[in-house]
Image: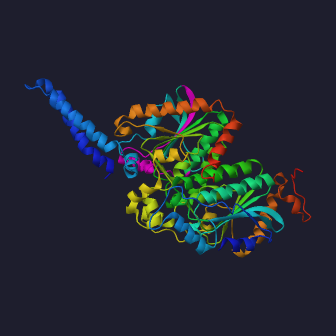
Amino acid sequence: MHAFDRIAMLVDSDFVEIGGDVMPGDPLGWSDKTSYPQKLERDREKSKLSEGVVCGFGSIGDIPVALGVMDFNFRGGTMGTVVGERLVRLFEGARDRKLPVLVCTASGGARMEEGMLALMQMAKTTVALQRFRDDGGYAVTVLTDPTTGGVSASFAFQADVIVAEARAAIGFAGRRVIEQTIRQKLPENFQTAEFLLEHGAIDMVSERSELRALLTRLLDYGAGVRGAAASSATNGRTTAGASS
Amino acid sequence: MNAIVERERGLLELEGRIADLKAHAADQPVDLTAEIQMLEQKYAQIQRDIFGHLTPWQRVNMARHPKRPLGSAYLAELDQFDELHGDRHFGDDPAIIGGFAKLHGRRIIAIAQDKGVDTKEKVHRNFGMPRPEGYRKVQRLVRLAGHLGVPVVTFVDTSGADPGIASEERAQAEAIAQSIAALAEVPVPIVATVIGEGGSGGALALALADHVIMLEHSVYSVASPEGCAAILWGDAAKAEEAAARLRLTSDDLLGFGIVDEIVPEPLGGAHRDPHGTIGNVLSSIEGALTRLVTVPAGELRARRYDKFRGIGSPA
């Protein structure tokens, strides 16, 4: 699902993008069949996106939220320096504005063409998300198809609440890697959202059609945390622990 | 066959011949001094030719050299070490060894990945590929270090986290994510040393640290060269090509600011002088700890934040 379609589906039509001007360099000077900048250009045209994640502020069911949406159409949703930087700006912005964080993930993992700088985005997003949470921040992730590698092994699985979209492929190692390594047939529902739910790895599975309503409730449950976001979500209920 | 093992074979033969000649020189009617000297010069020349400059792929092979000192060898050189087992939930992962230790008299928590020496031990230690319970043991030990106020010292050497069915069932991604988070959080100094292979997230789970050291010929990579080649070009055999592009050597990573210090290896690699190499690594760790223990916890964490926050940020 295209990042902007997902944003349109979830957000109340007040989405304001941040970090859209953070653009990739070519830190390794990578080139194989084509150069890395050429690959990026091709993916920009193909996906109508400037990079693998769209971040910004908006409201879901009247609850203000800092939202990040990854898109598999841009280099397989891989996390490089731009995805890392945009997410960290989002987490820092959420901390300043006392908003909850919601990230919808879709990623094949770390981006090979940025080498170790890409891997280190796992550390970078982790320190930022942990600081946000330390400060009373509330984070929800929605794991969409597919979420693997460096994204699943960092911020995606560090949120307070983890939702997966029904039937999404989620895991650490890619299915092909596992098959090649162990040379045996994998269980039918292996690495699906339902498989993870069954094994206790995630909080819940949601159909896409129900996601907006579910997230509205989940964001509301966290609204008592340091009084964040609660002020505008006044639908008659009190927000326990509101600090102001 | 390991590319370094292949290249050093002739060298080892020559080394043997020199030793033989020296041993029997006294019994011989002729003076062998000149011949020995000639061979020693030849040996030194070949050694420089082979090891003076290693390509990225040769460094990968050096990092995987069958005789390269493993994590347990470093633990054995500490003043003392008492292993703490298990993740308190599921099991004890032999791919990660951790526990109380003393380094130059200082109390630390030491954690090492270990690939195992012989076949039996390699199988036991899952070839150094940790399972989720290994990373959950790391989390537990890191929190224990925070609780006791003692530094964390890690030794990184893995081709990557275990990619098996059971590991996925026990949420390998979550285990790694939480280990990285535990290191991000802990209010005590962390020094990590990549001693062999730093394989992707499975390595980073022990390497988010205030001071990151790399042994000269170790490698640290977003994916193994084989994995990268498979992902990008659908052909793991193009690993050498991937290695050349990934910028995975210690010099590359020092240049990127991902690594803080390189500990040199003897010509020919760490396995040519394990004791000396390990001693140098431990001295570097001690040096870093001496500096870090004076930093107040709040500032330590603030610096750690800035360090990792800054990687890959636009200027």
Q: Is residue B113 a member of the stretch shown in magenta?
A: yes
In the visual, does B13 lie left or right of A39?
left
Q: Is residue B147 a member of the stretch shown in magenta?
A: no
Between residue A28 and residue A57, name the one nearer to us.
A28
Question: In the rendering, at what x and y percent does residue A45 appear?
Answer: 59, 74
**Residue located 87% across and 54% down the image:** A240
Which quadrant would residue B186 be assigned to in this image? top right
**Residue located 60% across and 40% down the image:** B210
In the visual, does A59 lie left or right of A121?
right
Question: In the rendering, at what x and y percent does residue B155 appear?
Answer: 50, 41
Looking at the image, the residue that sits furthest to the right is A236
Question: In the rendering, at what x and y percent does residue A100 appear?
Answer: 77, 58
In the visual, does B203 lie left or right of B268?
right
Q: Which residues are magenta?
A: B105-132
In the visual, does B292 lie left or right of A225?
left
**Residue located 54% across and 48% down the image:** B256
Q: What colouring style does the render use? A: rainbow
Between residue B311 and residue B173, name the one nearer to us.
B311
User: In this view of the protein, can residue A137 be seen by the observer?
Assistant: no
**Residue located 67% across and 70% down the image:** A3
User: In this view of the protein, can residue A86 be seen by the observer?
Assistant: yes
Between residue B52 and residue A2, name the one nearer to us.
B52
Against A128, is A218 above or below?
Answer: below
Against B102, is B175 above or below?
Answer: below
